[in-house]
Image (spheres, rainbow, N blue to C red):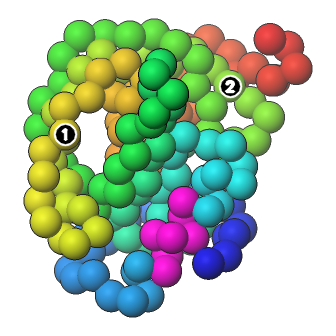
Amino acid sequence: MAIRTIRERGDDILRGKAKPVAEMTPRLQTIIKDMYETMYDSDGVGLAAPQIGIKKRVFVVDVPKEDGESDKYTMINPEILETSGEQEGFEGCLSVPGKHGMVKRPMHVKVRAQDENMNWREVEAEGLLARAILHENDHLDGILYTDLVEGDLLDNEEE
Ligand code: NI
C-alpha cells in the first residue's frame, strides 16, 4: 500500500469523465487500498480515483456515525438512482486544500454500485453520507464542489 499524490484543482484529470471499470484486477485492488490509505492520511471522508490520477469510475467513502462506527463503502461504476429532499452545509475537498464553501445537496440518495467483488448493491443514504456519495460521484464526471458553491469559497482559517 502507498499514499498517492492527491491531484489539485487546476489539474486537467479532475475535469475529465472517468471510464467504467470492466473487471476487478490486482492493479485495481491496489489502487483501492491506496485510495483508503491516502484518504485516511489526509483525514478525508471520501476520495475518488481521478483525485489520485486514475480515470476510473471508483470512489471510496468512510463517514463517521454518531455511535462511533462509520459508513464505509467502495463504489465502482456508481449510478445515482434517486435523490430527494435538500440539505445545505459546508463542504471541502482534498483536491481543494485549505478551502470550504456552502453547497446545497439532496438530503437523501439511493445509489447502485459494484463492490470490490464486482457485485451490484444498492445503498440508501442521508445527511453527511448522502453528501459524501454525491460529492465523490461528481468527481467521476469532472465536477468539483467549487462549481456548486453558493457565495464565496472560504479559507479554512476564516471559520
Ligand atoms: Ni472532493
Magenta segment boundaries in residue numbering: 30-36
Q: Residue furthest right?
A: 157
Amino acid under disc 2: His
Q: Nearer the viewer, residue 45 or 50?
A: 45
Relative side of 148 to 91, left or right: left
Which secondary structure dominates the residues rendered in magenta? Answer: helix
Task: Identify the secondary structure beneath mark 2.
Answer: strand
Residue 78 spot, x, y in % from top left = 23, 53
Q: Residue at x 85, y 13 (%)?
A: 158
Residue 53 spot, x, y in % from top left = 57, 71
Q: Are marks 2 and 1 in contact (CB under 8 Å)?
A: no
Residue 85 spot, x, y in % from top left = 23, 10
Task: Identify the secondary structure beneath mark 1.
Answer: strand
Residue occupied by mark 2: 100
Q: Residue at x 80, y 23 (%)?
A: 156
Q: Can residue 35 be found in the magenta stretch?
A: yes
Q: Nearer the viewer, residue 104 or 76?
A: 76
Amino acid under disc 1: Val
Marks counted in the figure total: 2
- Give the class, few, some or many, for how many residues have Cα within 10 Å of label 2's Cα (few <14, many ≥20): many
Is residue 119 depicted above or below 91 in this figure?
Answer: below
Residue occupied by mark 1: 123
Q: Which tag is nearer the camera, tag 2 or tag 1?
A: 1
Is residue 153 depicted above or below 51 in this figure?
Answer: above
- Ligand 1, image quadrant it occupies: top right
